Image: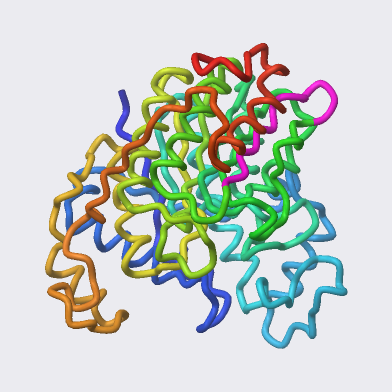
Amino acid sequence: MAAPLVVWDPALLRYRWSDDHPMNPLRLELTMLLATELGVLDGLDVIAPEPADDQTLRTVHTADYIAAVKAASVPGAGPYGDEDGFGLGTTDDPVFVGMHDAAALIAGGSVLAARSIATGEVTRAVNIAGGMHHAMAGRASGFCVYNDAALAIVELLGRGVERVAYVDVDVHHGDGVQAAFYDDPRVMTISLHESPRTLFPGTGRPAEVGGGDAAGTSVNVALPAGTGDAGWLRAFHAVVPGALQAFRPQVLVSQHGADAHVEDPLANLRLSVDGQRAAQLALRELADRHSGGRWLAVGGGGYALVRVVPRTWTHLLGIVTDRDVAPATPLPPGFCRTARAYVRDDGTPGGGLPLTMTDDAPATYQPWDGHRETPLDEAVLATRTAVFPLLGLDPFDPRD
């Protein structure tokens, strides 16, 4: 089997909205530093992408929108505001010089990864700079300009893949990817996210199941605020394996936003790095079981830039490349010297940094047993009731 493909170029750090914007590319820079110092990338071909061209971008985005992004990317552009209809110039998505080129490079990275899997050059690929899952066909949204995950799925379909499953574990609903394929029975989108009652983008209810012939291919698990590892993993294993088994994907695409972590400043779930690692391991096993090992993983959200994202995504890089990092592994000195400049020394032994690649959380769960005793179980049952019958599954049978 060919070595997994890791997509990376320091030029990806140019996707930077502003100095005080939550999505700071420091999280990418520190992730690659940590992965490098831990030896995760030793001997691997780390491939620099080319920007997605307009023809590629138009497979998901409108020509008018692409033109608007280009116009907003030059010095002195604007003023822009939400009234322009393209979502540019907002608090979430302010314009910046070079925005089109930076966003197209991220998109090109995920398309390259998808192409490499579709042609059989590799079985697995990862683009931690990707995961811009909120971008719509004609509108920027939620820090996202071009929807690289949707573009990657289109690339897979265009190269003969008949069924693609997309699993999104970001704390926010993967609305842009769902919208792109809501009526397409070739693509199943599964999103586990904080309830739309309490978090942006306000979508991702269980009743959103897909349209027309695609009914049953949009799967949404809306988790109560405050859900931690045990509840999150309980919900994941109650829904995702059964849905994938029924759909029989030929390629699995997964989005790994790290913002479900308890320390993330923009959301209200309570996962640990250990819980996020458990999800990554589960997705690797599901790819091996259901899609012949063909797996494309992308990044996503995550705004605890120093303490959380680098550890979570270094685990992801290790798991995709079969170089799993043991949770008890100490953070290497070089990483700590660099990272410590970005955190406040709180007097702990790590000087504001964790000491190891774990949060010392057990990341265990009790499998869903069909009961509805808690709000989390109600959420699981709501999803299973809405979508499982459309997949030929029994929503009340824990074995499905």
Q: Which residues are magenta?
A: 211-223
Q: Residue at 74% of width from left, 83% of height from top?
A: 77
Q: Residue at 63% of width from left, 47% of height from top?
A: 174
Q: Which colour assignment does the render follow?
A: rainbow
- In the displayed structure, would residue 384 be above or below residue 181? above
Whether residue 15 sits left or right of residue 68 in the image: it is left
In the image, residue 34 lies at what x, y percent?
24, 60
Is residue 349 or residue 29 the one in the foreground?
A: 349
- In the displayed structure, would residue 357 be above or below residue 396? below
Residue 102 is drawn in which quadrant? bottom right
Q: Residue at 73% of width from left, 67% of height from top?
A: 69
Task: Residue 222: say if magenta.
Answer: yes
Task: Residue 200: say if magenta.
Answer: no
- In the displayed structure, would residue 216 be above or below residue 205? above
Quadrant of image for the N terminus: top left
In the image, residue 377 lies at what x, y percent?
55, 35
